[in-house]
Structures are given as structure tokens and as C-alpha cells.
Amino acid sequence: MLKKLIVIMAVLALVAGTAFAQPNMGGQLMIGTNLLEGDNGEDSDVTMGGIGFHEAKIFATFGDSKGGGKLVFVASNPNGTAYAHSIGTNGTGGKGGALQTWGFLYWRPVAQFRMQVGVNADGDFGVARISGWGFTGEAKNSVAAMNDYENFAAGNTWWPLWVWQSGGREGNAFYPGTGDVPNVNFQFFPAEGLTTTLVLPINGGEELPVQDQISDFHFNIKYDFEGVGLASLAFIGRGGLAKDADTTASAGDIYASFYLSALEGMGAELGLTFNIPWKNASDQENGGYMGVGAGFNIDKGGPFTFKIRANATLGGKTNDVDRSTLIYANILPCYKINNNVWAFFYAGMCLETMPALGINDEYMRIGWFANPYIWVRAAEGLRFWTGIQLYQTNVNDPTVDPVLINWRVPFGFNFYF
């Protein structure tokens, strides 16, 4: 009997080993702080900043070409307060959890079809090749680079640097993918180079009417022209397609973009988005704005690389009032001193046209930042970042006085295992 049991267990282990490939385990430890910070005010103090980013991530990937998945556990306080962020707990990503947890499973029974369920917060479905998360990459997570995901000057919501990657940010010109929203998605590969993706948010298990679920769907078509570039057309629902929702939200945003890869050592991309206009219960016009974005990089394998990106939000209305025009631009040259030390100069500006409000004439307010930093490979798997950040907001704004120049000295460690 014992021998039979051993044989049965061995068979089950063999079957399980075949069905589920050996997991690939790994992780990342990150910590970032502002060593010193202050401004040029007359009576301002120099202070030591708190932990600006603190994250421990452990992940396991498993599976083969027929199916698999990923599971990630993250303890993090990216906003400077302990345990301030949680991913994948509801339809908006959630805030306020001590632990970020997310993961997904996928099944690809045939080469032409793939199904995925869960949360994929790595942005795998986004189409920006230059202008998105990878523009500064892990430097932003170590606070060395101005963060794409939040306003680096508290209270200045008009300076939304995170326009570059957020699906919810108005005017982002490139389809951002699913982000941290729980979803079911279906991918079809009908021909070589062609991919279509349908995404249905599932709101973290919350039961909603079918029409509300469908109203937030994503649909993306991508075609890879071999040796030329990648074209993409996408739609993200914003709730306006749901029953009785036409007076509360836009039907959605339409995206079109193209990434050119045919130039040796260079890349370029252009993106457009249009928010479908809608009227509220008072018959006032809303939405209808357009986003235009572009990115360009040079990397010919030598010590010098260069990136630039720009994005503008144009037109549209809010309750019959013309919306502001917003323009952003960033540059990022890099010089690789050697294999272990790289120097960057990250800089950017934002312009916003402000309408006359009765107390002042129309004006344009300006924000800018200059952010030199270095990357150092300290040991196998260990690297650190440090630099200087200078930034100023509300320049040329008659309603703000004084307009201070703020400064910070960031320092961050990254360790991979």
C-alpha cells in the first residue's frame, strides 16, 4: 500500500511540475530620502526630509507559453507617510493600506488568443516607449528624479507632472494601459504583428450593473510594422456610456499613437488623445479637450544619450467655461562616465494660460525644475542615486507672492535580488 501511495504521489508531483513551471523568485528593496531641503525665503530653515520612498517588493513569476502569472507583495510609503498606498484593492487602485498586493494569471490555449485576470501594475499594456515610466525609470522610485506620479510641490495641483503615465490624468497623449485597476482582458493575435486587447475592469470584486462595468472598458489595437515602428489606436471608457450617465461623465477618451524605430540609434513617438465632450444636467458643455504628445531619444551605444518629451492639453470646456491650455516639456541628457557611474541632467517646465477672473487679466503661469543626479553601481545588485533638485512654481502668477525657489538633496538606494 505504501509503495502504491508513493507511486501516486510521484505521479501527482510530475503532473504538477509539468502544469506549473518552476517559479522564478526575485525582489527589490528601495529607499529614498531628501537629505536636506529648503527654499530661498528670508526666514526659511534648512531641514532634513523624511523618507520620500520606501519599498520592499517580492515577486514570483511562473508558467510557460500556455499559461502563468505573477504575484507581487509590496510594503511601501511612496508619499512620505508610513503605509500610505495600496494597489489593486478597488477600482481606483485604493489608498490607505499597509501592504500593496497585486497579481494576475493568464491562459493562452492557442497562439491566437490570450486571457488574463487580475492586476498588472507594471504598465505592460501601455504604448508609450519614450514618454512614459521609462523616461527616468527607477530613478523616480529612489526620489533622485522628480516623480512622474505626484505633484512635487504640495498644493500645486496645476503642475501635474504625472501626466506622463497616468490613465486618469487629463491630456495624457499615450494610451497608458490598465495600471492598477483589477480587470479581465482578452487579447487576440489574428495576424503577425497585429494585437487587439479588450479590457473589462472588475472593480476589486464590487458588484456593479453590467452597463456600469462595460462603460469603463478599454479597447486597444496595435500593429507592429517590422523594422519601421508600432502603431496604436485605443479607447478608454469614462463612464458616460452607462445608463443615465450621459449627464455626469464623458463617454471616454480616444488615443492614437505611432512609435518610429526605423532610425538607427534613435526613436521617436507621437501621440494624440481626444476626450469626447458631454453636457451636464444643466446643459453645460464639458470635456472635449485634446492631448498632443511627442518623445524622442538618441542612444547610439556611446557614452552619451539624450531624451526629450513634451505634452500639451488643448481646448475643451468645464461647465461652458474654456479650459486652460497646459504645456509640459522635459529633457534628460545622460553621460556614462564609466560602467559604474552615470551622470544625468533632468529638467523641465510647465506653462498654463489662466483666464481673467475679474481680479486680474489673463496671464500665463510658469513652473520649472532642474534636477542633476548621478547613478552609481556600488556592488552586485546594489546601486544608489543622489543629486540636487531645484524647482519653482507659480512664476508670473499675480495671486502668489512670494514665489520661492525650492531645493532638495535626494539620496536613494536600490537593491535587486
Image: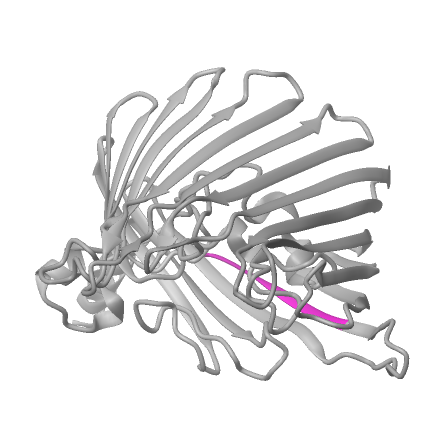
Q: Please give left or right for residue 291 compared with residue 380 in the image.
A: left
Q: Main secondary structure of the magenta part?
A: strand
Q: Is residue 156 above or below residue 20?
A: below
Which residue is at 47% across, 78% downward?
99
273 or 27: nearer the viewer: 273
**Percent position (x, y) of residue 148?**
59, 56
**Percent position (x, y) of residue 105?**
30, 55
Picture quadrant of residue 264: top right
Q: Is residue 25 in the magenta section?
A: yes
**Residue 380 is at least partly visible in this image:** no
Q: Is residue 87 above or below residue 352?
A: below
Which residue is at 75% across, 48% downward?
346
Which residue is at 27% across, 48% downward?
277
**Percent position (x, y) of residue 88?**
36, 68
Q: Is residue 358 in the magenta section?
A: no
133 or 192: nearer the viewer: 133
